[in-house]
Amino acid sequence: MAKQIVVLIHGMNTVGPWMETVQSILETDPDIQVKHIKFDFLDPIRFLCPLKICRDSTINHIYSGLLSIINDNPDKEISVLAHSFGTYALSEILLRDESMEFYKVLLCGSVVKRSFNWGLFNKRIKYIVNDRSVNDIWPVLAQLTTFDYGASGTYGFTKSIKDRKYTVKHIGYFDDEFVRNNWLSFFSDNELYKSQTHNTSEKANSPFYFHWLHRPMFLSMLVVLSFFISVVSYFIYQANLPCYKKWLPSAEYSKCFGETQKAYFLPQVVNGRVNIWGEDVYKGDWSTGPRYWCSFSRLTRKQFDEINRRVVAKLNGALLGQRSFISSNGQELIQGTWETDGGNCERD
């Protein structure tokens, strides 16, 4: 009978397809039984939300799962293997419940803040190790994009925990050879911190751009630069627009109106608003076709259909509107107006 239960907790935007692979390898040790805690997709919006309340439902689900496993197995040692967001959820649970204890904890792809003090749990966790990778950019991006995460899965923690350095990608930890050589030995053997895999390299360093992304000053500069580029792009875009597509003060709109109606129909609608400087500005919704049109009245249905066919086919025209009425002798007569590219649209 297994003496140790290893609980697997996956990360965001996934349902942990790697869990079955890890389970099959860890359970080659008859003293280990593996259990999964799965949760619905944690989408990027909730993951990146700066408010913890956005993630509370997911963390509470994981907490309930852990409590259930612990309560159902009072005579067994409970260990945890957490990946990515699962590491963050575990750290929050340990802070909330001071009675929760584990035999071994293994973190990988961690997004917990590097300064997190795991030493607070020395009496509640017997062995803990953090597997980090210098080629894992996701913890760096997590720290860059919101306030509650850290790049511990890339650079390690600053205190109170054993870090093991690798060169795998964010999901590279789940390679069969990696799991067999590193994780199985951690949960089974007395040599708890041994690393044997060929992916290990103490001399390996992260790509240079990881370090820039990791710096708070870089994030501030990136935000300022993005805002500056957006503002400049907006004014360049506005400067190149024709006047009839801009919001203009009254005097400038009147001038634009006079120029535009020479080539375009009158505006269908004139919109007004107050700009950020408190100034009244206006913009018309103009018909952008050329200013050629023809209109016929008192057409029979047959005449109307024939003119419509000819104007559309020969003059690239379009029917702008039509109105029908019944004459005194009971005949339907139609009035139609067409817009064209020019040319003769005389009635035959």
Image (cartoon, rainbow, N blue to C red):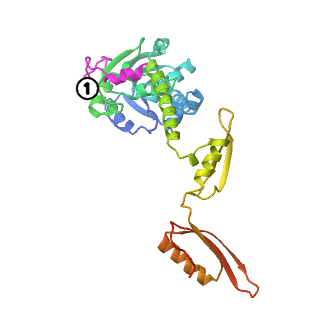
Q: Which image quarter is the N terminus in?
A: top left
> Which residue in the rendered view is the most extreme toward the bottom?
329
Name the residue rendered at 29%, 25% in the picture: 167
Q: Kindly state the secondary structure of the residue where label 1 is placed.
A: loop
Q: Is 261 positioned to the left or the right of 106 in the image?
A: right
Magenta stretch, main secondary structure class: loop
Q: Name the residue under label 1.
A: 199
Q: Is residue 53 above or below residue 334?
A: above
- Residue 208 shown in magenta: yes
Q: Where is residue 210 in the image (x, y as percent from the top left)?
A: 36, 23
Q: Which amino acid, mark 1?
A: Asn
How many numbered circles are shown? 1
- Residue 203 shown in magenta: yes
**Magenta region, residue range:** 188-215
- Taking depth in this image into account, of 30 and 127 the one nearest to the observer is 127
Q: Does any portion of residue 225 appear in the rendered image?
A: yes
- Taking depth in this image into account, of 308 and 41 the one nearest to the observer is 308
Q: In this view, does 249 lie above or below 223?
A: below
- Taking depth in this image into account, of 268 and 38 the one nearest to the observer is 268
> Which residue in the rendered view is the most extreme toward the right?
328
Name the residue rendered at 40%, 23% in the picture: 213
Name the residue rendered at 56%, 62% in the picture: 291
Give the quarter of the image for residue 36.
top left
- Taking depth in this image into account, of 92 and 335 the one nearest to the observer is 335
Q: Position of residue 339 (x, y in %)?
A: 56, 67
